[in-house]
Image (tube, grey):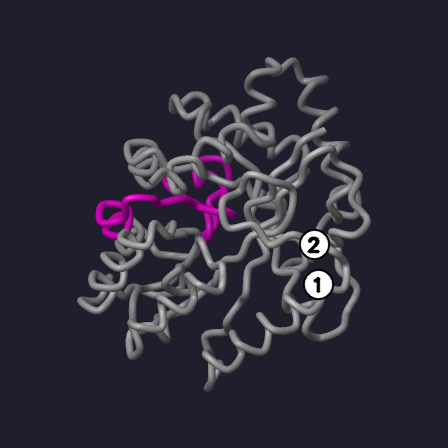
Amino acid sequence: MTFIDLHTDTPLKIYKGQECAADYTKQSFDFYLQNMAIWLSDSDPEPKRTYENTLTAFKNYAQENNINITKNFKSSGAFLSVENAGFLANDPWYLEKMYNDGVRIISLAWNGQSPLAGGCQSKASLSNKAIKIIERMNAYRIALDISHLNEESALSAIELSKFPLATHSNCKEVSNHPRNLSDRVLLALKEKGGIVGLCLYPEFLGGDVFSRLYENICRLIYLGMEKNIAIGSDFDGAEMDRRLSKTEDIKTLHSFLKDKGLEKSIIDGIFFENALAFFDKICNN
């Protein structure tokens, strides 16, 4: 089986020396790509230092366990993202270092207000500094993750970004949670060729994880987004349903969706093909 996970918070667990739900060393997929997101808290007084420390811990872990850190998504391994890079507002040139570190996806805020944008618990708009950062991201072909942004910031970011996506979000029409995305945002992503990594966190799903994931898939298909659906588990970043709490459980989800009668082409798209097509655009030229 082939699987691409658009969002895990595993690097923080590795940095803290804790057991990981998305343990790359225990996977048995034929091809597996895992987004290793470096999460930075809204209240972190030294986010750049946290980024550096977490990155170093993960790279040491990857070397010790022969994990490939891919920059072109062509082989099994891990790829890097940064969740809440608001500190770039005061150091935009640091983006070049992050790119050289292997970071290929960046979000501008977490739940609160950052110097760049408003998270889902904030009413702030995209800042002027954010516009410059997004222009730099476009030049480096770094994708922009809008998962945590409020609607106004998300729509502005999608319009400006060449490569927008939501790594771990669900549909607000299925469950009216502040972290979920409205049809307006989803259709804006579709227009720009973005993808949506459906999140497995029960609180966002608002019910039985398997049935609600299926409802989210049906909603996206209804919106004409069957080529834009992916999985962004949020493993190691949230407390999951015990039936779907670690990466190996993805095989159970795959079987469930097959039993629901989804076409093979749609299932393959969800678990890997749509993400690969998105990454191919990033890596082009």
Real-space Cα separation, disc 1 to disc 2, in angstroms: 6 Å
Which secondary structure type mostly characterizes the magenta part of the structure? Answer: loop
Indicate left or right for 4 with 30 as reference: left
Residue 89: say if magenta: no
* Secondary structure category for the residue under label 1: helix
Q: Which disc is residue 263 wearing?
A: none
Would you name the residue on which mark 2 appears?
67
Percent position (x, y) of residue 99?
A: 41, 61
Foreground residue, 275 or 93?
93
Label 1 sits on what residue type? Gln
Residue 127 in the image: above or below residue 80: below
Q: Is residue 284 left or right of residue 54?
A: left
Q: Which residue is mark 1?
A: 63
Residue 254 higher or lower than 283, as above or below = above
Which structural element holds mark 2? Answer: loop
Q: Position of residue 143 (x, y in %)?
A: 38, 49
Residue displayed at 29% across by 72% down: 92
Residue under the point 72% across and 52% down: 22
Work out whether 42 lies above or below 105.
Answer: below
Give, as a single range, the part of the protein colored magenta.
155-182
In the image, taking residue 86 as reference, residue 128 lies left or right, namely left
Farthest residue, direction bottom: 45
Q: Residue at x 36, y 66 (%)?
A: 96
Residue extending furthest left? 128
**In the image, residue 187 above or below residue 247:** above
Disc 2 residue crowd, few under 14, some 14–19, many 20+, Cα 10 Å:
some
